[in-house]
Amino acid sequence: MNHPPVPPINWSKRLIYLACAIFFFTLAIIGMILPIVPATPFLLVTSYFLVRSFPKLNDLLLDTPYFGPILYDWEVRKGIRPIVKLQAIGTVVLGWGISILLFPIPVWALILMAVLVIVGIVFIYRVPAPREIDPKANTEAEEKEGTQPEAESHSLKPTQSPSSVAKDR
């Protein structure tokens, strides 16, 4: 993957970013093992720090079979797959349910937890599904050596969807 050059930052800041990336990656690994802790948000934060400090390490992370597709969907396709959303929502509800069953929680804390769970579920639900990438546009952009392809104006017929116009090109 081609990255823009890393902004000139001093090595101490890069090492702090790397330490943060390692910390959040550890939390993501814990999230893979424990059903209560979600892995995806920690992966996104890990990627954030790696891209700004050591992009080649982020490329290695993108190449992993478990983490790569999730990060690719978020970074390139700008969304989260429905199955990943379902897993995240299930994890949140399961964690909340286990907490209620195992720990004596005061009513005010139960209400606060319920509000936070609902906010979390709404946030996860509202994240869009990954958009389709037009391979032709990517090829044209690579041919222009990193420049953005020019926007073309298309008028849609009432029975056409934007995806069918993209297929016609």
Image (spheres, grey):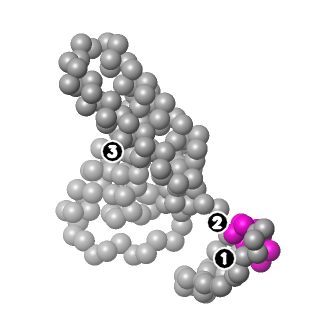
Rounded to the nearest whole Å, what is the CA distance between mark 3 and mark 2? 29 Å
Q: Disc 2 vs disc 1: Cβ atoms closer than 8 Å?
A: yes
Left or right of 121 on screen, residue 52: left
Q: Is residue 163 magenta?
A: yes
Residue 124 sits above or below residue 157 on the image = above
Q: Amino acid at mark 3?
A: Phe
> How far across and down, in percent of the image, does residue 118 sit?
38, 36
Q: Which residues are magenta?
A: 161-169
Task: Count the numbered circles shown.
Answer: 3
Whether label 3 touches label 2, CB < 8 Å: no
How many residues crowd mark 3 within 10 Å: few (<14), some (14–19), many (20+)?
many
- Asked if one can make out residue 52 in the rendered structure from this viewpoint, the answer is yes
What kind of residue is marked 2?
Ile
Seen from the viewer's position, the closer of residues 92 and 75 is 92
- Which residue was labeled with disc 3? 24
Identify the residue under disc 2. Answer: 133
Residue 54: percent from left, percent from top: 37, 62
Precedes in sequence: disc 3 or disc 2? 3
Along the line of sight, the residue nearer the viewer: 11 or 81: 81
Q: Residue furthest front?
A: 158
Q: Nearer the viewer, mark 3 or mark 2?
A: 2
Q: Is residue 138 above or below residue 88?
A: below
Instruction: Give residue 169's position: percent from left, percent from top.
Output: 77, 77
Q: 155 left or right of 128?
A: right
> Which residue is at 39% across, 75% downward?
5
Secondary structure state at the residue bearing disc 1: helix
The residue where tag 1 is placed is: 137
